[in-house]
Amino acid sequence: MTNKKKVLVTGLSGLVGSALRDDFQDRYELSSLSRYGTSGIDDAHNFKGNIADIDTIIPAFEGQHTVVHLAADRSANAQWASALRNNFIGVYNVYEAARLTGVKRVVFGSSQHAIGGFYRDEPYKSILAGKYDGIDHGKFKKIDETVPFRPDGYYGASKGYAEGLGSYYSEWHGISSINIRIGWTISDDDPTVTPAGLSMWLSHRDTAQIHVKAVDAADDLMYTVVFAMSDNYWNIFSLEKARQILGYEPQDDAGCDLNLEKGLSYRDDTDYKQHEEDPDSY
């Protein structure tokens, strides 16, 4: 255990955290930070705190090499009060706690919603709706990291803000900031329930892979933003930067077949909150 890199994950019980947990437990000295604790983590690595209150999270950051920050209001339809507390203030507290405790790297769970305004444009609009007639699969330009921010809500805006904040803490405080624009990680790993899933899906093993690649990236990689989806046939995002900068090689493809009758599970509804008894907790 002592020879492993010390890594703290916020939101380890969430959809993305659950997908990467097994790989992280095998590879790192893994700690968790959450409001209520995380099942299956020993007491010495199971920290409790609220990312909206910096004083409660400082102990979890002490001695960590890397913090993977996933905790947030994950709803694409997040309202302002919740987004402000859990996403804007929360990510500031994470970076500030990292600065105060000497954490070397923050891997941030960003989102494709930071550029969701492009989904109003063709051919992306039609592809995400599953309307493929007339679209030349090999010819349309994929969205890459050079496009401007076009958030599609307070959630998307919070992700763009966090990417900018990471740049500041990297440039002025020497904290490596790796921002992963996650596509769509689904609890049962089946993206066929929606046309958008065929484009945005990030499988569980690809989720784990890209986060491991980010944690293990060279120490001199001080700042980057990359898209993270599986190698989907109808992917509208470029994965070239993730491949070049992090060595990411996605293993899975959502394919072209849909199973619309199945429908989303309760947990995969983006408005679902982990702790329903406390709507302010993430």
Image (spheres, helix red, strand yellow):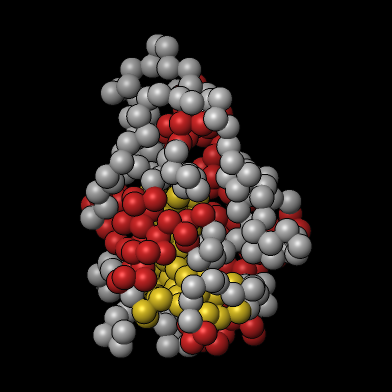
**Image location (x, y in percent) of residue 133:** 42, 12
The answer to whether residue 1 is left or right of residue 68 is left
Q: Residue at x 73, y 58 (%)?
A: 276
**Image location (x, y in percent) of residue 79:** 73, 51
> Which part of the image, by quadrant, shows the N terminus?
bottom left
Q: Residue at x 51, y 31 (%)?
A: 193
Q: Nearer the viewer, residue 15 or 150?
A: 15
- In the rendered view, tell whether residue 65 sits above or below residue 280: below
Q: Is residue 106 visible?
A: yes
**Image location (x, y in percent) of residue 177:** 41, 67
> Which part of the image, by quadrant, shows the C terminus?
bottom right
The answer to whether residue 121 is left or right of residue 49 is left
**Image location (x, y in percent) of residue 39:** 54, 71
- In the rendered view, tell whether residue 84 sits above or below residue 113: below
The answer to whether residue 233 is left or right of residue 41 is left
The answer to whether residue 236 is left or right of residue 219 is right
Q: Nearer the viewer, residue 258 or 101?
A: 258
Image quadrant in which you'd find residue 146: top left
Q: Residue at x 56, y 25 (%)?
A: 261
